[in-house]
């Protein structure tokens, strides 16, 4: 199942990113694994395809160093990518399908919608996670 493919959520799994895409097969819209790996955000961004709608996620470690104690918490980021080279008709179907993918990646800490691989950077993710962290912000994030 696609849900089991999201091994990124399992901190003991070395896989730390996953991309899914939609494909038409015999008039049915199917979910297909477009890529997964252990190289984090950088590797995931390299797999984004401007001719596809892709949904995915990656794992980030929030590192907190205070008073000689270091703690680490897992953060999961959901990404909706709509390639710039898609037709208006295809782009129009994205909101209809988004809910299915949100359920697959349920429980993420941050949701990003991008249309260019260059939009999703460590700086953007760090700033967005900090903005969502409330009063207790970690010292840094490891990608």
Image: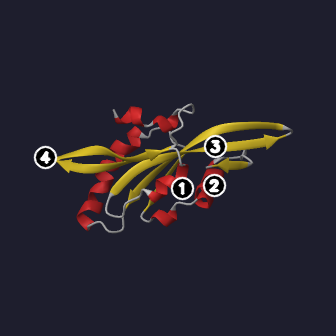
Query: Quick one: SS at disc 2?
Result: helix
Q: Residues within 10 Å of mark 4 (few under 14, many from 20)?
A: few
Mark 2 lies on residue: 126
Q: CA distance from mark 4 to mark 2?
A: 42 Å
Q: CA distance from mark 1 to mark 3?
A: 15 Å
Label 1 vs label 2, nearer the camera: 1
Q: Which residue is mark 3?
A: 61
Of labels 2 and 3, the one closer to you = 3
Judged by depth in the image, the label closer to the viewer, 4 or 2, is 4
State the CA–CA distance, disc 2 to disc 3. Answer: 11 Å
- Relative to 115, is 42 above or below? above
How far apart are the alpha carbons under marks 1 and 2? 14 Å
Which one is in front, 51 or 128? 51
Seen in the image, is 59 located left or right of residue 142? left
Q: Nearer the viewer, residue 9 or 108?
A: 9
Check the picture and name the quadrant holding the N terminus. top left
Disc 4/disc 1 C-alpha distance (Å): 34 Å
Badge 2 or badge 3: first in the primary sequence: 3
Q: Residue furthest left?
A: 26
Badge nearest the viewer, 1 or 3: 1
Q: Earlier in the sequence, mark 1 or mark 2?
A: 1
Do callouts 1 and 3 mark residues in contact (Cβ within 8 Å)?
Answer: no
Q: Residue at x 32, y 68 (%)?
A: 85
Q: Which class describes the residues within 10 Å of circle 2: few (<14), some (14-19), or many (20+)?
A: some
Task: For marks 4 and 3, give the CA distance.
Answer: 41 Å
Q: Is residue 18 visible?
A: no
Q: Residue at x 40, y 36 (%)?
A: 5
Task: Identify the residue under disc 1.
Answer: 42
Q: Which label was assigned to residue 26? A: 4
């Amino acid at each position: 199942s696609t849900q089991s493919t999201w091994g990124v959520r399992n901190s003991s799994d070395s896989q730390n990113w996953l991309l899914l895409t939609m494909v038409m097969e015999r008039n049915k819209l199917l979910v297909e694994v477009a890529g997964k790996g252990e190289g984090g955000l950088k590797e995931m961004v390299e797999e984004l395809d401007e001719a596809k709608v892709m949904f995915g996620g990656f794992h980030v470690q929030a590192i907190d160093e205070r008073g000689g104690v270091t703690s680490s918490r897992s953060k999961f980021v959901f990404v909706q990518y709509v390639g710039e080279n898609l037709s208006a008709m295809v782009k129009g179907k994205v909101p209809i399908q988004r809910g299915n993918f949100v359920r697959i990646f349920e429980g993420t800490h941050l949701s990003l919608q991008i249309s260019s691989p260059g939009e999703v950077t460590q700086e953007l993710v760090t700033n967005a996670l900090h903005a969502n962290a409330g009063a207790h912000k970690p010292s840094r994030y490891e990608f």
